Image: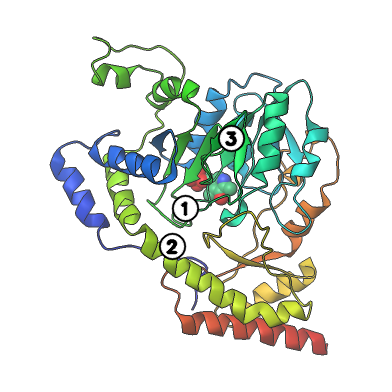
Amino acid sequence: MIPFNRPYLTGKETHYIYEAVNSGKLSGNGMFSKRCQSFFENEYGFKKCLLTTSCTDALEMAAILCGIEFGDEVIIPSYTFVSTALAFVRQGAKIIFADSMSNHPNIDVDTIESLITSRTKVIVPVHYAGVACDMTKLMALADKYGLLVVEDAAQAIDSFYTKPINISGNQKKSALGSIGHFGCFSFHETKNIISGEGGMLAINDERFIERAEVIWEKGTNRAQFFRGEINKYGWVDIGSSFLPSEVIAAFLWAQIENMSLIQGRRIDIWNRYYEGLKELASNNQILLPTDLGYSTNNAHMFYLICPSIFIRTRLIEFLKTNDVFSVFHYISLHNSLYYKEKHDGRVLKNCDMFSDCLIRLPMYNELTNEEIDFVVSKVYEFFVETQQI
Ligand SMILES: *Cc1c(COP(=O)(O)O)cnc(C)c1O
């Protein structure tokens, strides 16, 4: 059987957990948390990183920091995970869903300006499959209308926007998650770098750092207290317990140490799928991921686009009968049970197309070349057979 995902362990996880346990400090914001945070700040140019218990939590922190109030509007792609919207809905925001591009699941930045009103406060680009949204255009819009940008970079660790960006005269670094005011990452076991459940908020605008530390620790000024800046800590703001324990951070550190190994293998897998399926795509049987020309690929996932939901359903079934587990992805949020009554009725046809036609193939570090070739051969076999009907 070839599963869809298998969490990859570097072998050092339990060693560092043992070290954390023996250090006698198990709650959050200890040595391992700081080590992980510093690594990300130095490696990717985020101004300040705070580990969280999930990307959902990082998004919730961002929503609080953006100062969302009841009725504020937040522009989000409909083709995304629920947390992208949920974090803002909890703060009272009205979600305005944008469509995907026709050739990529990412938000179609050209449709955003027509969605901006006097109530719009935030845009949330989601870098689907670790591939960058068009951040030059998006940041220019945010600048023009005075909006905040929260990058949902849950899938985008170690991926880069490759064009230079100029915001209000400042040249910005280009790691995904470092371009907007905030970047939110996930270390869920289905992502590239994992800690079971886990996440991180990257704060790129200095104005928000102090308040972020308060919100992170239940609305208290503990961080200042431990730095000796005040003699007593107290309750000063809203917040929650957003920080993970040292056990989680220790696990994450083992993954971070092996980042280039993990990423290298994933990229090899991705390229092997791509090469293997190229011919099928050139015969117009399927579409392969489009290279948008302004992003690196962190090989978070390998997907293809089938001609219809009917064919996709049958392909998933066919692969399953051959012991290969493939999955579809998001159901458009504007059609979800929770949100469809609140949506303004606009048809988001590209998003619906990806909901119907996108299929993800097995992708994990221990997938062997033989297994990849087997999956590829089965995809070919399926299309040869369906053509004959
Ligand atoms: C995985 C994911 C999330 C949620 O991450 P958690 O760490 O599970 O909360 C949010 N947004 C996107 C785009 C994701 O892929």
Going from the N terminus, do you reach mark 1 or mark 3 first?
Answer: 3
Is residue 7 shown to the viewer in this render?
no
**Residue carrying label 3:** 150
Inspect the image, locate mark 1, and give the three-letter code of the amino acid beneath it.
Asp
Is residue 315 shown to the viewer in this render?
yes
Residue 176 position (above or below residue 171): below
Tell me the quarter of the picture where residue 258 sits: bottom left
**Residue carrying label 1:** 158
Please state which of residues 261 and 5 is positioned toward the viewer in this rendering.
Answer: 261
SS at mark 2? helix
Which residue lies at the image location 25% right of the left edge and 20% below the top edge?
227
Distance from mark 3 CB to nearest ligand 1 atom below 8 Å: no
The C terminus sits in image quarter: bottom right
Tell me the quarter of the picture where residue 237 sits: top left
Please state which of residues 323 and 236 is positioned toward the viewer in this rendering.
Answer: 236
Distance from mark 2 CB to nearest ligand 1 atom below 8 Å: no
**Residue carrying label 2:** 263
Going from the N terminus, do you reach mark 1 or mark 2 first?
Answer: 1
The CA distance from mark 1 to mark 2 is 8 Å
Number of other residues with Cα within 10 Å of mark 2, as a class: few under 14, some 14 to 19, many 20 or more: many
Specify the color scheme: rainbow
Residue 364 at x, y = what percent?
Answer: 46, 67
